Image (cartoon, grey):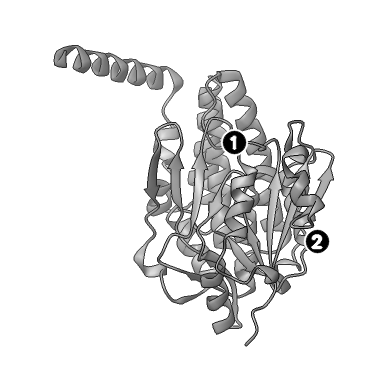
């Protein structure tokens, strides 16, 4: 059978230092190059992204689209709409693929028409330490077709998430039926998995085929300045609320909605801890919502660390102070 055309989407914002490596990893694939289209949606970069990519644009090696800054979800949605391939691969602009990735994924898709999503573990590169670590996936999800709805229950009942971001690829005919709200913003990776899995089956390969890069400019890396971290967390809370709204409005099953409500409520009170604003009233309202409204059960209470969120700020500060003191004492004792 002839190789089908595939699309690789690269939403980007101010990643001129990394994006060439991402694109080159696609250009070095063992999959036929004439069957790969690369679509870059630049979400209003203010660095030299366009200049960095100009040669590739002029050579028509990539399809480049610039837009005013509207957030990652909007850039991703616009990239998906421009795809003409049978399968769509997501690639964050600061990550990269290994050379056999596309060929391996396409083989899985082509073997089973019901598969709408393929994923793997990622290799995580901690750039400041030059350390490469492989994610560990549960063995029960590897190497076999899985019903998407079952997989969502498996993930959320265990408070884990795999198969998104740069490890994500989806069948275009399924993915293009989904309208992505701008408001899901920084939870676009999670949203894409949530939205596509109910449409068919998923398959996880047991070999890592992508690298997820952790670096100082990465949104998921904790900000050094507290005020910057608070702004990040506020943005993430808005994104979380938008995902929850989507689940409710699109009639996802009650069990999954309940878990996401628990997760969203836990994110909110955790933010209050970080911003040093958690009050006794916040703890009370959280406890009422969890134990009397949601009633998630002991397993979910444990998996989502609910009890930790019930600890008052004064006690948390005391615990942290004690831990810091013990850490310093241990260091002195070894000197």
Mark carried by residue 277: none
On screen, residue 24 above or below 221: below
- Asked if marks 2 and 1 touch (Cβ < 8 Å), the reply is no
The image shows a total of numbered marks equal to 2
Position of residue 129 measured from the top left corner of the image (x, y, whole percent): 39, 33
Position of residue 107 measured from the top left corner of the image (x, y, whole percent): 54, 77
Q: Residue at x 34, y 15 (%)?
A: 321
User: Which image quadrant: the N terminus?
Assistant: bottom right
Nearer to the camera, 142 or 44: 44
On screen, residue 74 above or below 102: above
Q: Which residue is mark 1?
A: 219
User: Which image quadrant: the C terminus?
Assistant: top left
Q: Which residue is mark 2?
A: 82
In the image: residue 141, left or right of residue 241: left
Nearer to the camera, 141 or 28: 28
Q: CA distance from mark 2 to mark 1?
A: 25 Å
Position of residue 317 measured from the top left corner of the image (x, y, whole percent): 40, 17
Secondary structure, mark 1, is loop
In the image: residue 45, left or right of residue 216: right
Nearer to the camera, 263 or 177: 177
* Earlier residue among tags 2 and 1: 2
Secondary structure, mark 2, is helix
On screen, residue 201 above or below 101: below
> Do we see residue 307 in this rendering?
yes
Q: Residue at x 79, y 54 (%)?
A: 78
């Amino acid at each position: 059978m002839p190789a089908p055309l595939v699309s690789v989407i690269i939403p980007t914002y101010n990643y001129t230092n990394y994006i060439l490596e991402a694109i080159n990893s696609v250009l070095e694939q063992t999959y036929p190059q004439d069957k790969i289209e690369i679509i870059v949606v630049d979400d209003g970069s203010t660095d030299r992204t366009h200049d960095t990519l100009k040669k590739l644009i002029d050579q028509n090696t990539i399809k480049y689209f610039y837009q005013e800054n509207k957030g990652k979800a909007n850039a991703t949605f616009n990239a998906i709409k421009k795809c003409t391939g049978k399968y769509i691969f997501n690639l964050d602009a600061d990550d990269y693929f290994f050379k056999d990735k596309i060929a391996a994924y396409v083989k899985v898709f082509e073997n089973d028409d019901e598969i709408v999503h393929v994923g793997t573990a990622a290799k995580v590169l901690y750039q400041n330490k030059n350390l490469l670590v492989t994610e560990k996936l549960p063995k029960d999800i590897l190497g076999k077709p899985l019903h998407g709805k079952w997989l969502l229950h498996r993930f959320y009942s265990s408070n884990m998430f795999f198969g998104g971001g740069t490890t994500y690829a989806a069948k275009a005919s399924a993915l293009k039926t989904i309208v992505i709200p701008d408001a899901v913003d920084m939870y676009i990776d999670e949203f894409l998995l949530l939205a596509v899995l109910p449409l068919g089956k998923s398959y996880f390969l047991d070999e890592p085929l992508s690298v997820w890069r952790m670096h100082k400019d990465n949104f998921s890396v904790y900000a050094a300045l507290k005020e910057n971290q608070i702004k990040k967390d506020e943005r993430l809370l808005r994104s979380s609320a938008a995902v929850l709204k989507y689940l409710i409005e699109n009639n996802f099953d009650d069990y999954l909605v309940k878990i996401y409500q628990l997760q969203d409520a836990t994110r909110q009170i955790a933010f209050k801890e970080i911003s040093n604003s958690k009050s006794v009233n916040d703890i009370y309202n959280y406890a009422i919502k969890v134990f009397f409204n949601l009633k998630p059960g002991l397993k979910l209470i444990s998996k989502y660390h609910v009890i930790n969120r019930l600890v008052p700020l004064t006690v948390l500060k005391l615990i942290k102070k004690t831990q810091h003191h013990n850490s310093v004492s241990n260091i002195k004792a070894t000197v």
